[in-house]
Amino acid sequence: MTNPQIENNFKYHSPKEGQPAKYEVIRNKAKELAMLIDEECPDSREKVAAQTNLEQAVMWANAGIARN
């Protein structure tokens, strides 16, 4: 027995036409926000958490594009 969702989540997804451009747009917008957070937030655990979660958001957004 195989689970199609698990199979899809754990396989390599080569970029399809148009996907690399979408990845770049998401990364660039996230970078803008990361720079804003870095400039406006005092150095703190919360700032680190915000940056880490932003990185995770980018990774999940890219996974959503790749997997679907």
Image: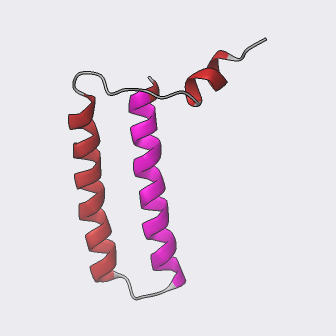
Is 35 on the left or on the right of 4, as rendered? left
Question: How many numbered discs, if any?
Answer: 0
Please tell me which residue is depicted at 27% across the width and 81% down the height of the picture: 39
Measured from the top left, where is residue 32 in percent x and y? 23, 63
Judge whether 39 appears above or below 27 on screen: below
Judge whether 19 appears above or below 25 on screen: above
Quarter holding the N terminus? top right
State how the image is colored.
Answer: secondary structure
- In this view, which residue lies farthest toward the right? 1
Please tell me which residue is depicted at 64% across the width and 16% down the height of the picture: 4
Query: Which secondary structure type mostly characterizes the magenta part of the structure?
Result: helix
Q: Nearer the viewer, residue 10 or 55?
A: 10
Measured from the top left, where is residue 25 in percent x and y? 22, 44
- In this view, which residue lies farthest toward the top? 1
Please tell me which residue is depicted at 62% across the width and 22% down the height of the picture: 7
Magenta region: which residues?
A: 45-66
Judge whether 19 appears above or below 43 on screen: above
